[in-house]
Image (tube, rainbow, N blue to C red):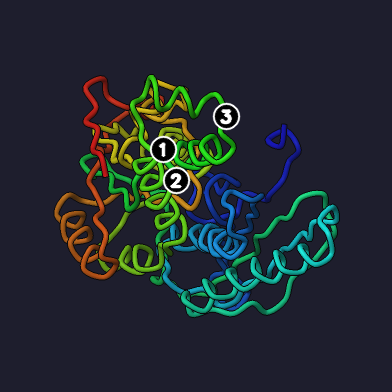
Amino acid sequence: MLRDMNLGDGNNLGTREGRIALDCSVRETRQGNFVISTTDFFFPLVESPYLQGRIGAANVLSDLYAEGTGECDFVLMLLAVCRDMEKEVREICTREMVRGFRDACDEAGTTVSGGQTVMNPWPIIGGVATSIVAKGEFVHSDGARVGDVVVLTKPLGTQVAVNVQEWRVDDKPLWKKCRDAGGLSVSEAETMMHTAVCSMTRLNRHGGQLMTKHHAHAGTDVTGFGILGHAQNLSENQVEEVGLHIHTLPCIQQTVKVNDAVFDFQLTKGYSAETSGGLMICMSRQDAEAYCDELERLDGFPAWIIGDVVASKDRASKIVEDVTILEI
């Protein structure tokens, strides 16, 4: 629908034909610098309002990092306060969400400089993140080349883990199916959720900082469209006619078993939504190997080469038939 509404002016940088397409609006200023800006917000995914605030901040900042910058100049916070909570509960939850959001912004070296607050049936938190950079301080995300490899910096499966946690806590029928058909224990479900929360709250800052150093040609982050949805979106917005062929899916441990035996989130098909997911980056193999090594040293978590950039006249991306599943 929005494609028919003539939004934009064709002057966005980093997308084929200057379209509104990828993670951020990238614009050249009248003074010759570049403004990278993005916005996002989230409904509650976890029981802790503090962690929800951190996840909300990490997610909106990730869009900036996907453009190859590790710096955010300021954030405007978007906050919806739940009008249906009792006053005391509402104040506690709101304060903790804001604290989590602010702490993540502090970790990112940025500040919340303003925003907007409304009353709403559901609590929501997110923001508008902005980075002002010079030429060479970000990646034009339309330069993927045939022969590049594809890197992913976080595992997949957050949607599965969050849903299993809800089923378990509320003792829903699907939790019984997890135990009976999936063979999932309480301990395994808790570990799965812990891994997902650690991933969702972890900033992609170092991943963004290293993109220019290691000569990345294009990048995006993996969120609501799933890994294949974002791979397809990325390939459609490259100058060259290319597609991304995904040969490896790093997934949070036990999420594939739940997906296959309990409920099909389309995780292995590439369409399971991720929250505050990893960066997906196209670069040469040599640069990719050095990038993954340095990122693991900085973050303490691995990144993986998960695919190849191939020639494709219809710009089609896919998951190969004999895809390798890595349990993380």
**Circles 1 and 2: CB atoms closer than 8 Å:** yes
Residue 316 vs 34, above or below: the answer is above
Residue 44 vs 185, above or below: the answer is below
Please identify the quadrant where the C terminus is shown. Answer: top left
Quick check: can you spot residue 11?
Answer: yes
- Numbered disc in front, either 3 or 2: 3
Residue 140 in the image, given as x and y percentages of width and height: 42, 57
Element carrying mark 3:
loop
Quarter of the rendering containing residue 148 = top left
Disc 2 target residue: 222
Which residue is at the front of the view, 308 or 205?
Answer: 205
Which residue is at the front of the view, 159 or 230?
Answer: 159
Disc 3 target residue: 172
Residue 259 vs 82, above or below: the answer is above
- Numbered disc in front, either 1 or 3: 3
Q: Amino acid at mark 2?
A: Val
Q: CA distance from mark 3 to mark 2?
A: 29 Å
Residue 243 vs 296, above or below: the answer is above
